[in-house]
Amino acid sequence: MIEIVNVNNDTQIRNEMRMEFRAISENEAFARTAVAAFVTQLNPTLEEVSDIKTAVSEAVTNSIIHGYDGKNCEENRVWLKCFIKNDVLDVEIRDTGVGIEDIERAMQPLFTTKPELDRSGMGFAFMEAFMDDLEVISEPGQGTCVHMVKKLGVTSWILNED
Amino acid sequence: MENEFKIIDNYLMIRMPDEIDHHRSVYISKMADKYIVNEQVGNVVFDFEKTIFMDSSGIGIIVGRYKKISCFGGKVFAINVDKQIRRILLLSGLNDIVEIME
């Protein structure tokens, strides 16, 4: 189900998009590409598109392999919501999976509960690095909601690191 | 995908796909391990020429293979690394374990 709500008044560009898809790994590429296509209206740079795609990919992958433990069930779904206001992109990725017991610990770089699956433990660190703001709301057994914000049209600090 | 893996002397060359995410990484890791064990290669070279997207799953592939070969003195190399992939490697602190070749 994809619905696009376009409200365009004179002073601000406002746009909104919602998606719901099955929690299977094939949809990771679909989700990040959909968000990348949605932000084209803001004329992002290639770096900005890459950053957004990586961050979305991390969050969706987390929902699929951690939230739903990689189980492919009809009822396991991921919800994605994007909101644009002026030049700011708001992305929300939500699942109704197992949730996170200790959010602070989960967000530490290199921490992973699935080292046997070659997970690097860098997911949240990447989301934090590539987006401007990251908020994680989770309750064990209730699922997880990842909320990210990125302002477009500003050069990221990390580009100047080379 | 079979011909994405090639053995040259003591090196396993892996041509990475255009998009590296969790969905693709499972297969790459599994195949690479098969070659490492069966062919007894010492070093692994990741070729990112075709790659236009990578997330932390790529880091998982590299670190996982490094763990498998480093105890025998093997090394991990990355070639044809573009700006975006370099950023991801540096951000994960992988420049200590992967040699990025120009």
Image (cartoon, rainbow, N blue to C red):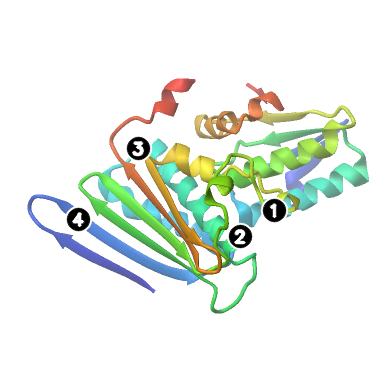
Of residues A3 and A113, the one drawn nearer to the viewer in this rendering: A113
Q: Residues within 10 Å of mark 1 (few under 14, many from 20)?
A: few
How far is mark 4 from mark 2, CA to CA? 33 Å
The quarter holding residue B95 reads: top right
Pinpoint residue B12: horizontal percent, then vertical percent.
81, 37
The quadrant of the rendering that contains the N terminus of chain A is: bottom left
Q: Residue at x 30, y 32 (%)?
A: A154
Along the polypeptide, which appears first: circle 4 or circle 2? 4
What residue does disc 3 label?
A45
What residue does disc 4 label?
A14
Foreground: disc 4 or disc 1: 1
How far is mark 3 from mark 2, CA to CA? 31 Å
What residue does disc 1 label?
A114
- Tell me whether marks 1 and 3 sit on the same chain: yes
Check the image and report above or below for A38 versus B56: below
Q: Residue at x 19, y 55 (%)?
A: A14
Amino acid type of the residue that numbered disc 1 sits on in the rendered structure? Lys
- Tell me whether marks 4 and 3 sit on the same chain: yes
What residue does disc 2 label?
A66
Amino acid type of the residue that numbered disc 4 sits on in the rendered structure? Arg
Amino acid type of the residue that numbered disc 2 sits on in the rendered structure? His
Query: Secondary structure beneath disc 3?
Result: loop
Of residues B2 and A119, the one drawn nearer to the viewer in this rendering: A119
- Tell me whether marks 4 and 1 sit on the same chain: yes
How far is mark 1 from mark 2, CA to CA? 8 Å
